[in-house]
Image (cartoon, grey):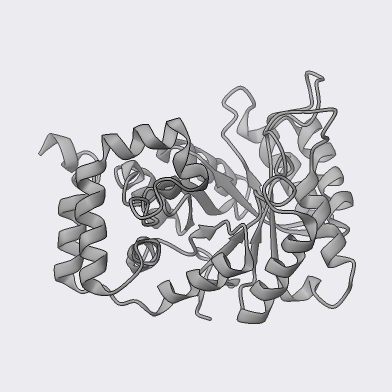
């Protein structure tokens, strides 16, 4: 396994992160345990979850919520594993039906952290990510709440997810004024089919020394060899069929290129992200142990300049950083 510093910190994380959103919903607990065991065995130490994962991403009193965290907590309770992983979870999404059961008030951050610690059966969260920006809560309040959690030893690092470039800049400037480390990571939608973050988010991350952790690195399946498996599983759903039809010519060119390279499309998609120096660790969300082990191949793929140019032709980005991408 290869490792990389998370942003400007001294913390080293595996180049692939294990995403656990499927745990409890599409993947049962026994299989989830096997996936985490295998991840640990192959050297993946970045384990990503969220308080809302494991079911519908909204309160469901019949099914419950926090299921993914609870599964991880029971896995950790077996002992000998906690200090081998970088445990990542998130706060923001609704965790109840009350008006203060969501977002980033100091009130909710405190309660959400305590609840996550209980479900995870641990004394600390290594990286606590804000799942979305909350523009109705002042940064002074958010940072005060986060600083307290760090002082108490309940949280080590703070990250963001789905932030705009100007949100990142605002957050960091106010953190600096408080002599606080601020953000060390940003988890964004980023893959060959979704490159908008190249305009302003990635430049902001590089300026402030914040690590980029892409989610949906395979474009929700579009980059996973979808034409060969078009009638299977989620690929057969109407929404996915619409996406396939919309991008069919690009997908055909992409899969033909991957075949020429002798690599699986899913692995080329990951390798493309890993080639970007701004990227710390794409999040893979396997539903089976086999899907996890197959992903490791991406770590060994080296893409030539010619291949990278061809990928840009098939899946063009926004044209570079803003404003040069559109004003020059």
- Which quarter of the picture shows residue 40? bottom right
- Using the image as rendered, state which of residue 204 and residue 252 is in the foreground: 252
Q: Is residue 119 above or below residue 310?
A: above
Which quarter of the rendered picture does the C terminus lie within?
top left
- Residue 243 placement (x, y as % from top left): 35, 36
Taking 115 as reference, is 325 left or right? left
Report the residue that reaches farthest toward the left. Answer: 328
Q: Looking at the picture, how far across and down is residue 216, in whole percent? A: 47, 49
* Residue 172: x %, y % from top left: 52, 46
Query: Residue 285, image x and y in percent?
Result: 57, 56
Q: Which of 257 and 124 is in front in this view?
A: 257
Q: Nearer the viewer, residue 309 or 225?
A: 225
- Which residue: 67% across, 41% down? 143
Q: Can residue 38 be seen in this view?
A: yes
Q: In this view, does 257 lie above or below 40?
A: above
Q: Can residue 316 be seen in this view?
A: no
**How many marks are shown on the rendered structure?**
0
| Residue 279 drawn above or below residue 262 | above
Give residue 318's quadrant in the image. top left
Q: Quadrant of residue 44?
A: bottom right
In this orientation, which residue lies closer to the viewer: 236 or 57?
Answer: 236
Rendered residue at 43%/49% (across/down): 221
Relative side of 24 to 11, left or right: right
Q: Which residue is drawn at 69% across and 53% down?
A: 27
Looking at the image, the residue that sits furthest to the front is 231
Compared across the picture, whether 141 is left or right of 135 comes to: right
């Amino acid at each position: 396994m290869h490792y990389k510093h998370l942003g400007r910190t001294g913390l080293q994380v595996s180049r692939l992160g294990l995403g656990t959103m499927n745990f409890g919903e599409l993947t049962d607990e026994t299989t989830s345990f096997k996936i985490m065991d295998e991840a640990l065995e192959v050297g993946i130490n970045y384990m990503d979850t969220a308080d809302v994962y494991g079911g519908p991403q909204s309160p469901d009193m019949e099914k419950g919520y926090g299921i993914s965290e609870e599964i991880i907590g029971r896995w950790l309770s077996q002992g000998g594993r906690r200090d081998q992983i970088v445990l990542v979870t998130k706060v923001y999404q609704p965790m109840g039906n009350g008006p203060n059961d969501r977002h980033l008030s100091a009130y909710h951050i405190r309660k959400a952290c305590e609840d996550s610690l209980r479900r995870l059966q641990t004394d600390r969260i290594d990286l606590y990510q804000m799942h979305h920006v909350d523009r109705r809560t002042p940064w002074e309040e958010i940072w005060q709440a986060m600083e307290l959690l760090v002082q108490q030893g309940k949280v080590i690092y703070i990250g963001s997810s789905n932030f705009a470039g100007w949100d990142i800049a605002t957050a960091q400037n106010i953190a600096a004024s408080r002599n606080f480390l601020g953000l060390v990571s940003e988890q964004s939608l980023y893959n060959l089919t979704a490159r908008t973050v190249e305009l302003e988010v990635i430049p902001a991350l590089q300026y402030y020394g914040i690590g980029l952790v892409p989610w949906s690195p395979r474009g929700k399946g579009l980059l996973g060899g979808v034409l060969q498996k078009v009638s299977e599983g989620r690929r057969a759903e109407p929404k996915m069929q619409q996406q396939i039809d919309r991008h069919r010519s690009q997908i055909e060119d992409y899969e033909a290129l991957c075949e020429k390279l002798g690599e699986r499309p899913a692995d080329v998609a990951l390798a493309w992200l890993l080639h970007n120096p701004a990227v710390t660790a794409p999040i893979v969300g396997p539903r089976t142990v086999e899907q996890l082990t197959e992903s490791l191949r991406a770590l060994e793929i080296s893409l030539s300049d010619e291949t990278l140019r061809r990928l840009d032709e098939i899946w063009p980005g926004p044209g570079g950083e803003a404003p040069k991408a559109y004003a020059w």
